[in-house]
Image (tube, rainbow, N blue to C red):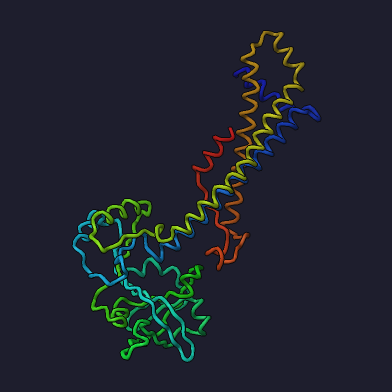
Amino acid sequence: MNFPFYISTRYLRSTRKGSFTRIAAILSIAGLSVGVSALLITLFILNGFERVISEKISQFDGHVRISHFLGQPIEPQITSLDSILNIYKGKLSNTKFIQKPALLRKGKFAEGIILEGIETKRVNYIKDILIEGNFDLNKNNIIIGQSLSEKLNLNIGDEIVLFDIITLNSGNKKLKIFKITGLFHSGMSEYDNSLAFTSIKNTNDLFAMNSKVSGYILNLENQTNYKSLTKLLSNELPYPLMVMSWKEKNRALFKWMDIQRLPILIIFGLITLVGLVNIISALAMITIDKTRQIGILKSLGLSKQKLNQIFLIKGLIIGLAGSLFGSLFALFIAFIQNNYKLLQVPEDVYFMDFIPLDVNLQNILIVSIFVT
């Protein structure tokens, strides 16, 4: 066995009652474990928040949207787009949509909404948010948010009237009667309070689009490729078509999340740094406490280099132990929270009803390497 390693472990495993070396090592490991677990749990929470919000937003907006620069209707078939989509054949889904503001009326109640007409294959991406009824968009069926239904006291089976807002003050009002067949709930008030889904045919009839559409929604199998797809489409599609990814559309939200991430990581990084300082302090005190033993080892011919190795190995063992216990505790907390949802938050504020913790092995490795 390597001699410096043997001496280091002997010091740390000292069974002598009240051993200062052992107590100092335990306290250092405990302090570092707290710092590591706090930093990892913070990273897991930030990862979880970003993932949940990203999934919910991309569920509604798709990964990439193509529309007219001025919001005007566009042709349902674009040759240059078809040639580009062939490159990603089998790796994405392309659906047309019509999105227009409308006035919903039921008896004496009225509310402005955003009506989105979608194709049948688009339902597969949003069906998970349905909480009641079904996503049958045939005939004059419509799906509305649960929050909107509660606000206007609407139920499944009720008939409502939708007006084209642009024609409200004209002598030729455009309106259509719809039947509510389902309620959805996403946890995002922006969508739950104002968005409604129906078939693309129904929206085309209501707004007299003449078979034109508002644009295209593209969903990738691997969402990490959205940047390359957005860049390619932006370079190839002619004006006035506009290409926008889900992150660009919600730039302010993700910018805010990035701004919040930095100070939080700095604060908990400093906590971890305190744990590292404790290790250095512990090693210094151990050195003082073991002055007599060090003198004996030097008199026996142990070189200064070997002595330095003994204390370096001590620090490394304490660092590894602190990283291990801190990481295991963080993983335990993540498992408990994700399975039992003990820490809950108001959904109307955070877009989710509990704090999700996303474990990332890269985070664990980086933090462990940093503290050792």
Residue 95: quadrant of the picture: bottom left
Q: Is residue 367 left or right of residue 251?
A: right
Q: Is residue 360 left or right of residue 284?
A: left
Query: Which residue is at 41% across, 66% downward?
Result: 60
Percent position of residue 301, x then y? 67, 8
Q: Nearer the viewer, residue 336 or 187?
A: 187
The quarter of the rendered structure image containing the N terminus is top right
Q: Nearer the viewer, residue 168 or 34?
A: 168
Q: Nearer the viewer, residue 232 or 345?
A: 232
Q: Is residue 254 left or right of residue 209?
A: right
Query: Which residue is at 52% across, 56% downward?
Result: 49
- The count of marks equals 0
Percent position of residue 304, x then y? 64, 13
Query: Which residue is at 55% across, 39% downward?
Result: 367
In the picture as drawn, the residue positioned furthest to the left comes out as 79
In the picture as drawn, the residue positioned furthest to the right comes out as 17
Percent position of residue 241, x then y? 27, 63
Query: Which residue is at 48% across, 73% downward?
Result: 192
The quarter of the rendered structure image containing the C terminus is top right
- Name above or below for residue 276 compared with residue 191: above
Q: Nearer the viewer, residue 368 or 72?
A: 72
